[in-house]
C-alpha cells in the first residue's frame, strides 16, 4: 500500500484523522460523492485546464506513476 499523501488527503487528515485513514485503507466504508460534489470536481478539471492555458509551454506533471523526485524536475 502506498503511504504517500496528496495535498487534498493531507488537508483531509488535518480536518479528520479517521476520514484520512478510511480514504487510504478502507474506501468502501465512505459514502460516495453526491451529484453536487461530482459537479465541483468537474469544475475543478475545467479550472485546471484554464490554468494550463495561462502558461504556454508548461507541462502537466502526472500524480500517479511518478515519484516525488520525478515531479520535481
Image (cartoon, rainbow, N blue to C red):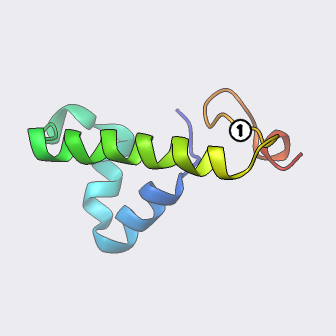
Q: Is residue 47 left or right of residue 67?
A: left
Q: Position of residue 36 (x, y in %)?
A: 12, 46
Is residue 9 rendered to the left or right of residue 6?
left
Q: Is residue 22 above or below residue 27?
A: below
- Report the residue at 32% width, 38% height from top: 42
Residue depicted at x 45% and y 49% = 47
Which of 26 and 55 lies nearest the eye of the viewer? 55
**Mark 1, secondary structure of its residue:** loop
Residue 13 occupies quadrant = bottom left
Can residue 34 be seen in this snapshot? no
Evaluate whether residue 6 shows in this view: yes
Is 45 rendered above or below residue 15? Answer: above
Residue 27 placement (x, y as % from top left): 26, 36
Q: Is residue 16 left or right of residue 2?
A: left
Reading the image, the residue beneath label 1 is 61
Q: Residue furthest top?
A: 65
Residue 18 x, y percent position in the rendering: 26, 60
Number of numbered discs visible in the structure rendering: 1
Amino acid at each position: 500500500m502506498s503511504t504517500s499523501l496528496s495535498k487534498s488527503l493531507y488537508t483531509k487528515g488535518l480536518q479528520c484523522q479517521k476520514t484520512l485513514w478510511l480514504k487510504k485503507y478502507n474506501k468502501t466504508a465512505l459514502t460516495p460523492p453526491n451529484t453536487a460534489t461530482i459537479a465541483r470536481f468537474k469544475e475543478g478539471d475545467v479550472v485546471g485546464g484554464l490554468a494550463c492555458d495561462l502558461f504556454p509551454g508548461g507541462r502537466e506533471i502526472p500524480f500517479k506513476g511518478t515519484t516525488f523526485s520525478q515531479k520535481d524536475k
